[in-house]
Image (tube, rainbow, N blue to C red):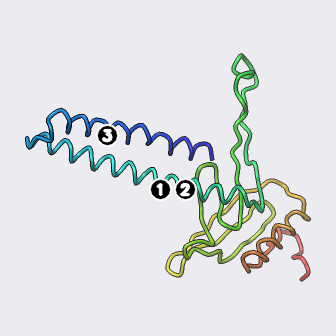
Amino acid sequence: MRTIRRKKHSFVPLIAFAALVGAWLFVRKGGGCESWMLTLQAGLLLSGAALAALLLRGRRERNVARLITENPILHIRTAVISELSGERARDRESEHAEVIVSYFGILLGERIIKFNQKGIWIRAVEIGGDFISFTYGTERRTQNIHLLRPAIDPAELDRFAEKIRYETGVTAVFIPEEGQKPPCP
């Protein structure tokens, strides 16, 4: 979430710079008709518009990421990276590679996978011994994401499966590990 916010804020100074240079060129020449001036102003206008479009796209991504983080079903920390020795150990916080699963999508670090929005629906959920698999997509295009998961309490997995079924109507399928009997229905 922090990375998405940081990426969005990086466009603001660029848009302001393009607008200020364009305005300065317009005022400096009084709106002159020299071809190089008009070309430069048009380039600045187009680049400012493109940056503004990227800013709006980033804002939409941030809103979807916020929606996912505010409505979690499952939160998995896949890795913890931290400095153990030296001066940096005191100054630096540990970094968490995390996965947040929600009714609205999955947040994988800074990558957003949306579903149950704009025609993208969950088609199937499979839960295995060390993974959770989501099949999602539209009528024309279907994708699958396979999340490796740490050992989770079976009761919590049952709650997760029930929440998915209640919110999306998709029943999670438990896949037994090799050499294990399938659960009774």
> In 3D space, how far apart are the residues under numbered discs 1 and 2 (Cα atoms)?
6 Å
Instruction: Name the foreground residue: 115 vs 45.
Output: 45
What is the x, y in percent for residue 38?
A: 14, 44
Q: Amino acid at mark 3?
A: Ala
Q: Is residue 23 left or right of residue 9?
A: left
Instruction: Examine the image and state in which quarter residue 104 appears.
Output: bottom right
Q: Amino acid at mark 2?
A: Glu
Considering every residue shown, the one lying at the far top of the view is 87
Q: Which residue is mark 3?
A: 18
Q: Is residue 154 left or right of residue 50?
A: right
> In 3D space, how far apart are the residues under numbered discs 1 and 3 (Cα atoms)?
19 Å
Residue at 53%, 81% (x, y): give it.
139
| SS of the residue under disc 1 | helix
Q: Which residue is mark 2?
A: 61
Whether label 1 touches label 3, CB < 8 Å: no
Residue at 55%, 74% (x, y): give it.
142
Mark 3 nearby-residue class (10 Å; few <14, some 14–19, many ≥20): many
Q: Amino acid at mark 1?
A: Arg
Q: In the rendered view of the protein, which quadrant contains the C terminus?
A: bottom right
Mark 2 nearby-residue class (10 Å; few <14, some 14–19, many ≥20): many
Whether label 1 touches label 2, CB < 8 Å: yes
Which is nearer the N-term, disc 3 or disc 2?
3
Q: Which mark is residue 176?
A: none
| SS of the residue under disc 3 | helix
Q: Which mark is residue 57?
A: 1
> In 3D space, how far apart are the residues under numbered discs 3 and 2 (Cα atoms)?
24 Å
What is the x, y in percent for residue 125?
A: 72, 72
